[in-house]
Image (cartoon, helix red, strand yellow):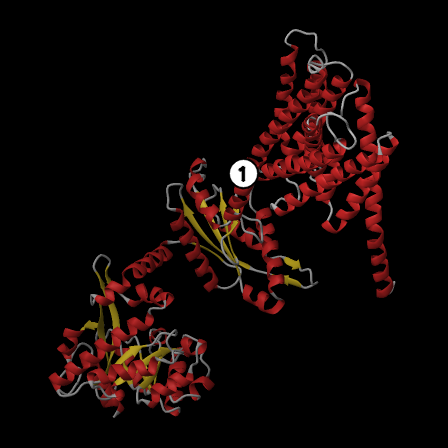
Amino acid sequence: MSSSSGHLAAVSRRDWAGPLVCVAMAVAYGGLAQATVWLHAPGAFEPVFWPGAGLSLAVLLLLPTRRWGWVVAGVAVAELAGNLAWGFPLVPSLWWVAANSVGPLVGATLLRRSGNPDGLLAPLHHLRSFVGFGVLAGPSVTATIGTLGSSWGTEGPVGALWQVWPSYLLSDALGVLVLAPLLLAWRSRGLARHPVEVGALFVTLLAVGLVTLADADRPLATGLPYLIFPMLTWAGLRFGIRGAALAVFAMTQVATWNAVTGAGPFVAALDDAGAVLLPVFLLGAALSVFVLAAVVEGLSDSTEVQRQLTRQAYRDDLTGLPNRRYLIEYLTGHTASWPSGRVVVFAADLDHFKFVNDGLGHLAGNEVLIEIARRLERAVRPGDLVVRSSGDEFIAVLHVVEADILPLARRLIESASGPMVLSTGSVITQPISIGIADGSPDDDPELTLRGADAALHHAKHLGRAQAYRFDEHLQRRDRDRRLVQSDLERGLEDGQITCHYQPEIDALTGRVVCFEALARWHHPTAGLLTPDRFMPAIEDMGAIGELFESVLAQALTEQSRWSDELGSAPPVAINLSANQIADSRLPDTVATALAAVGATPDRLWLEMTETALAHQPAYDVLLALHDLGIMLAIDDFGTGWSSISRLAAFPWDLLKIDRSFVDQLAPGESHTQRIIRSTITMAHDLGMLTTAEGVENPSQVERLTEFGCDYLQGYLFSRPVPAPDVLAHVTGEWLWAGPGSGTMAPVMGRRR
């Protein structure tokens, strides 16, 4: 079908929709009117309720306003045809047509403008608007116009005519309250969940109604109708507005049928009073049950909202798993009941998940997360808990009794790491790493989780798809990390972090060519902390710049003091962190520190590891430092994966051979010796000096000097010492006269 023909078909359907509404409304309204007249004919009553009013209001609220004209036209056609068929004069009939057309229209309009366009009866503020506009305002307009029509051509006092108005109002109001809620509430299928109970309620309601509303001659007959209220209460409490609407409809039919057939307590009253008392009773009963139902649904809605809010607070939207907030409360309140008294936490993180998001897109990443969540849930045992803790991290809390839980961790890794097919057709394998921490129900949940996270990070350093258990080493690192996070600022302000100095000595002359400044933290409670205890945490915190500035200022100040005392001073060497090399502000920071003490740039060495260079080769920053005249050194050479091209690409001044190679030096030719000799030769060919770290015995001095190493550094000469002890073994010409100095003379003589 072409687009134009489809458009014509749509227009055709819209053209026919209005007339169909009109015809359907006329048929339905006319049928209800005929049934109502037939129902009341046996007792010659005026209609106790007029269901057409409820039908009109409900249809108006169910349809868009553009169809309202057709609804009103259908009501008018049915009303006029019925009145003329029943033999009523034309003029009053037209008035009644206007009354039954305009009244529901007024009620529907007021409901829409009041913020209740769907005619809801719950919660209570919607019920108030429905009763005020749908049950009272609309029928009042109908009663007023209808009463005017009834007065047309009628003889007698005008005041007597307005006695018709209350019965007219009650009839329409009850018709709205009986039929409109039934039609409007039935849009929801909530009753279908309890079909047996609904059937039992309906049968019981009919039976009780027939008994209590059937015989007017019984003792206490006037009180029997109120026995129907427990049934109405049952309907309202259990099924809300839908049940109340069904119960009110059934009650009204039973009561009306009994009354018009001459049975029931309302027949015993005077005819006029009976015509009013019955609808008043029914209205009161209906309003009571609807108020109860509205309160119940309001409370239910509040409970449901609270339940949804609770679910949102404790559930992850993507995977449906509990979240970290739920996990904390679970660890706090549920694990104490475990018989073993042991809590084992597995922290699982997806390896290289960034590649999935970047390469396949975030939708694919979401699919992977959902699938990993399902696999972890299937892999754990009944009663265990799996949560999504953060972006691509999951936590499993397991009830285990095994001493060795690494096999269980490997089973989790294998179950999660199998191939998965995405909706795009891509097949990927997503490995995970796991960190494990043991705890007890009395432990702080955050500490247990922190231990699992620390083990997870260590597992990732070991490679992909690894598992690692939190041990004493990691526990110490975690304790140091928390200590740094809480005390670093005060440590810098109070001068707790100071410099110790270790000399580097010229292998030929025995002169001290440099003092390397190494930070030490004199912590008031933890004692003396070496850099390996606090440096990783400082780097993670992003506070390495503050520490560097403090060490730089202390070292340059101490160098100035040496110069004042001895007339000159060797350079000082300071280590740069990998996180600093890409900082464009670093050259200005160093220049400012030099200017503050009047030091020259050539008396400062900055050392960085080759691993740092591999990750952050910020050559612009390094060139700016070198242009200042600062000596730049590659530290721990041989432990990373620095390439020859990286060494050749920059004019380095010094290369420091890592102590792991120096430790393996022994008499005779070896693979390690060839590496050291080649490294020294390569460095010299590239214009770099060399320093050997970790020198601890005279034989190492001898071999390194034979290989042509320029400078020596290690415990053979001195451990790092506080500033006041630096000059203890130095002569006025900066010759080293301390430990190890005697081992150098034969070597120097031999080289000469």
The x, y position of residue 317, in whole percent, is 56, 52
State the quadrant of the N terminus: bottom right
Asked whether residue 122 is in view, the answer is no
Q: Which quarter of the picture shows residue 530?
A: bottom left
**Which sits in the foreground, 311 or 460?**
311
- Residue placed at 46% from the left, 64% from the top? 461
The amino acid on which the numbered mark 1 sits, given as a three-letter code, is Thr
Name the one closer to the observer, 181 or 342: 181
Report which residue position mark 1 lands on.
303
Report the quarter where the C terminus lies: bottom left
| Callout 1 secondary element | helix
* Relative to 506, residue 75 above or below: above
Identify which residue is drawn at 47% across, 46% down: 327
Q: Is residue 397 above or below residue 553?
A: above
Q: In the image, residue 283 lies at what x, y percent?
A: 65, 27
Residue 266 in view (yes/no): yes
Q: Determine whether 330 is above or below 507 in the image.
A: above
- Depth check: 284 or 319 in front? 284
Q: Position of residue 720 (x, y in %)?
A: 22, 72
Indicate left or right for 261 with 413 as reference: right
Q: Is residue 506 left or right of residue 4?
A: left
Q: Quadrant of residue 279?
A: top right
Mark 1 neighbour density, 10 Å: few (under 14) some (14–19) many (20 or more): few
The answer to whether residue 312 is above or below residue 97 is below
